[in-house]
Image (cartoon, coloured by chain):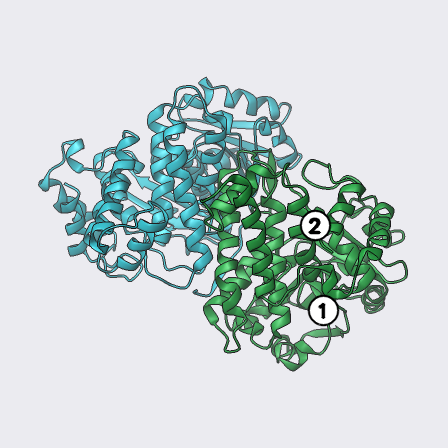
Chain colours: A green, B cyan
Amino acid sequence: MLNFTFHNPTAIVFGEGSITQLSERIPAGARVLLLYGGSSAEKNGTLKEVRAALHGRDVHEFGGIEPNPTYETLMRAVELVRANNLDFLLAVGGGSVIDGTKFVAAAVNFQGDPWEILESHGTVVSGAMPFGSVLTLPATGSEMNSGAVITRRASKAKLSFLSDHVFPRFSILDPTKTNSLPERQLANGVVDAFTHVMEQYLNYPAGVLIQDRFAESLLQTLIEIGPRVLQPQPDNEARANLMWVATLALNGLISAGVPEDWSTHMIGHEITALHDIDHARTLAMVLPANLKVRRVAKRAKLLQYAERVWHLNDGSEETRIDAAIARTEAFFESLGVPTRLSAYQLDARAIDPIVSQLDAHGMTSLGERNDVTLAVSRQILEAAL
Amino acid sequence: MLNFTFHNPTAIVFGEGSITQLSERIPAGARVLLLYGGSSAEKNGTLKEVRAALHGRDVHEFGGIEPNPTYETLMRAVELVRANNLDFLLAVGGGSVIDGTKFVAAAVNFQGDPWEILESHGTVVSGAMPFGSVLTLPATGSEMNSGAVITRRASKAKLSFLSDHVFPRFSILDPTKTNSLPERQLANGVVDAFTHVMEQYLNYPAGVLIQDRFAESLLQTLIEIGPRVLQPQPDNEARANLMWVATLALNGLISAGVPEDWSTHMIGHEITALHDIDHARTLAMVLPANLKVRRVAKRAKLLQYAERVWHLNDGSEETRIDAAIARTEAFFESLGVPTRLSAYQLDARAIDPIVSQLDAHGMTSLGERNDVTLAVSRQILEAAL
């Protein structure tokens, strides 16, 4: 087990009806900016509930934060906060809105070009505005962590930053708010959470017995509830578990003391930035290919994954590893999420530009052993064709 | 899943050598009271390391906090804090020292008789001094929760309190500090953590799929590392996992959204208060008896426990439940921890006074369904003879 610090100060308020607790969570007298995305939070009634809970407060609004939130859009929110001297942010939405809000929180009082926040991956952040969130889409874990991913439209760069200053003060998780989500977004959420766990779990044996078992618990639960959350009639038990699992998948718990990978995400980010494919859908293509290409380095954990998550105990070690990767692909496909670049009409010609962007962003030695060079990333992309 | 709030603000600093980070964690200029227990923290060098890390600071000391820390002793620490106008507490020890420090933190500025803190189970606490801890004994989870158990010597009352104001600001967990612990304390730690998990897990099906799997992960890991931590040559991997498992067993994570039991603890507390038997050793006697007596109400979860934790898949349901309880007893016994009152020369005559104390402390409807009446507690004690 590696030495670690675990400190997650976000308060989670979980359950049906929990939006009514908003007024206790936001300081009295706060001048609030409510941030949200497209029309779904409006249509499903979440925004209405939020406005009701904040009735009588000084609340401004900023809508239109896009999936893969852009620097260009968010800088308009930064200007709005500055112009109106607002002092508390409230994100209502999924990971994109919460990620965007983290950037706004860090950028408002930042001295210098706010894009440095992304270029430095957060090291230049020395403070941030307080903010909370109301989560409507279980997937990214942004509601209980200190990371965010922001895209610059002009340069097609999708970069991430981390800072202890951008943990939400609170996040409200009402699983019934997922009832109006389209199947595609629920499926994406399952794949996103699954891949978050795999990035922290499928590395090499590091004596992290309990972290491994927690990761396996999250994966097994996702496999169990994945088909259930896609059923047209909302399955409350499955949706509540998905919402909490997606949070726990990326809140620092299972990564504490663990060597982490994240190469699948870094490659996936470039695919989204270049081809506008949903984040989770890029992960579904890259993860299985990544496991195939790096099966020697990841051998011991692939065998553990085969046994404990997929209960594959028969046949040779190679057979079990093959089967575990095949089951992973089949699980994603069963949710309606393709696992091949060809599903998006991308062929071998797409690879050079993706590798060039990885190079441009310094992604030349990824993974838990820093051995995912650009050549390895190319192999992974080839395996995903 | 029940609605819940999860908010655990304690920072965990984990790993060999982490005591050196003390100086960054305690505010500059703080007037510190260092609290500890008997001579073990002195002998094993932990206190020496702590003093070195605080060199040049304004540090007072208060030693002699006993196992099952007493109100009488702790009130002397309260006086010391008041007399010297100290403003930060640092607990160095196991659960007893940390629990005691929580009481001191809550009592120093309490208006009224501080025993009310226990009698109200913490509801009267409206603030507390800041404090941190350096953990030397993995067992109770006190290093990352807001609960404490205090004994009043005069009345042989052992009562608990909970308050959000008494989360440690930080806890330093260096697993190598367990290397000098006697086998008895390590075995107690395993049993204590195991029982903490069982109180939160072995209830009734409540749609808490991920909490159940996390609980099963903790139990499986304890079963795996239990024998390893008792080996004379320290097994670093096992000890690091025990330290982190014991913390995770009672930090609010696996209880979020879950109906909890805790009747084993309440009965065990009375046994300790009357007979001065180690806390964990009372749990080892009460837990198996409790499962036997309440096997009908707990049937579904006992079957799940049999299958997932002990891999008991053969035979009738009754056979599997019997086997799971027997395996639990055998596990405790294998650690050198007896599971019968008779091991402490207690017979049927011991039961009346224990039941009377439960009655005196209002423990008349315990458990996840409030159906553990005094009559049921008596049956449990009879089953533990």
Toward the left, the furthest residue is: B349
Residue A282 lies, in percent from the top left, at 71, 59
Q: Which residue is mark 2?
A: A264
Q: Quadrant of the N terminus of chain B?
A: bottom left
* Picture layout, residue A275 above or below residue B78: below
Residue B2 lies, in percent from the top left, at 43, 65
Distance from the alpha carbon under mark 2 to that under mark 1 = 37 Å
Badge 2 marks a residue whose secondary structure is: helix
Residue B199 visible in this rendered orientation of the protein: yes
Badge 2: few (under 14), some or many (20 or more) residues near its Cα, within 10 Å?
Answer: many
Kindly identify the amino acid type of the residue bearing the numbered disc 2: Thr
Residue B231 lies, in percent from the top left, at 38, 23
* Picture layout, residue A80 above or below residue A163: below
Kindly identify the amino acid type of the residue bearing the numbered disc 1: Val
Left or right of B107, for residue B304: left
Work out whether mark 2 precedes mark 1 in sequence or the reverse, and give the earlier one. 1
Q: Which residue is mark 1?
A: A32
Chain hosting mark 2: A
Chain hosting mark 1: A
Badge 1: few (under 14), some or many (20 or more) residues near its Cα, within 10 Å?
Answer: many
Q: Nearer the viewer, residue A384 or A167?
A: A384
* Picture layout, residue A81 above or below residue B222: below
Q: Nearer the viewer, mark 2 or mark 1?
A: 2
